[in-house]
Amino acid sequence: MNGLMAQLAFLATDEGMTGKIFGLDLQIIFDALILALAVFFLFFLLSYFVFNPARDFLRKRQERIESDLATAAEEKREAMEFKAEYDARLKDADAEVDRILSDGKRKAKRRESEIIDAANAESARIMERTQREIELEKSRVRDDVKKEMITVATEMAGRFVSETMTAEKQEQLLDSVLKEMGDSTWQE
């Protein structure tokens, strides 16, 4: 340690350093200026080759992020519009289904009514035709009964003429003819 102290003492006793605090001379100032220029030049080179590309990269990244955020906001807005449109269409579809179902029910009821009316009309025509047939059959039966009565009356008249009849025989003959024809013939 004595050697270090001795060296410090020698520096302090150096001819050019006597009375100066730092011992600045022209060479140190010149070296400091060159060093400052070198640092400035290095800073300029680093700024041009490293800092500017890094700034550009960060600026582009920030612009891309802002663009992505704007795109995401726009897509979210479009998605909300699409969802609203989808909900409206779904609601319209539900209303359309209800309308179609009610139209179908109304048409079915109208068709049911038409079928029932047609069936009632057909039933009425059948009943009318059946009534006419019944009336025709009654008329035909009446005509047959009249013909039969005429036949019986002519037969009776022929028997009356062929025989001489007594009042007693006429009643017997009349009773026997009536029994042959039956009571139901006279009731109609």
Image (cartoon, rainbow, N blue to C red):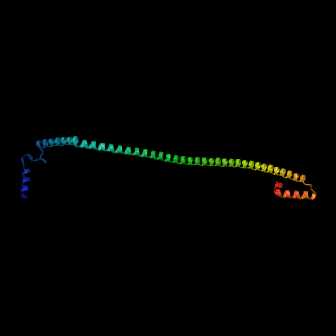
Q: In this image, 47 relative to 62: left or right?
A: left
**Spot occupied by residue 169 in the image (x, y as percentages of width and height):** 91, 58
In the foreground, 97 or 138 = 138
In this view, the residue in front, 23 or 152, is 152
The residue sitting at 64% across, 48% down in the picture is 115
Task: Return the x and y of residue 167 as percentages of the image width and height.
Answer: 93, 57
Residue at x 40% of width, y 45% of height:
75
* Closer to the camera in the image, 32 or 39: 39
Seen in the picture, residue 62 relative to 172 is either above or below; the reply is above
Q: Residue furthest right?
A: 166
Viewer-proximal residue, 82 or 181?
Answer: 181
**Residue 38, above or below 138:** above
* Residue 41, picture quadrant: top left
Residue that lies at the very extreme toward the front in this rendered image: 162
What residue is at 80 percent from the left and 50 percent from the top?
A: 144
- The answer to whether residue 152 is left or right of residue 119 is right
Residue shown at the point (86%, 58%) measured from the top left: 176
Give the quarter of the figure containing the N terminus: bottom left
Place of residue 123 in the rendered image (x, y in percent of width and height, measured from the top left): 69, 49
Left or right of 105, for residue 6: left
Count the marks: how many? 0
Residue 119 % position (x, y) = 66, 49
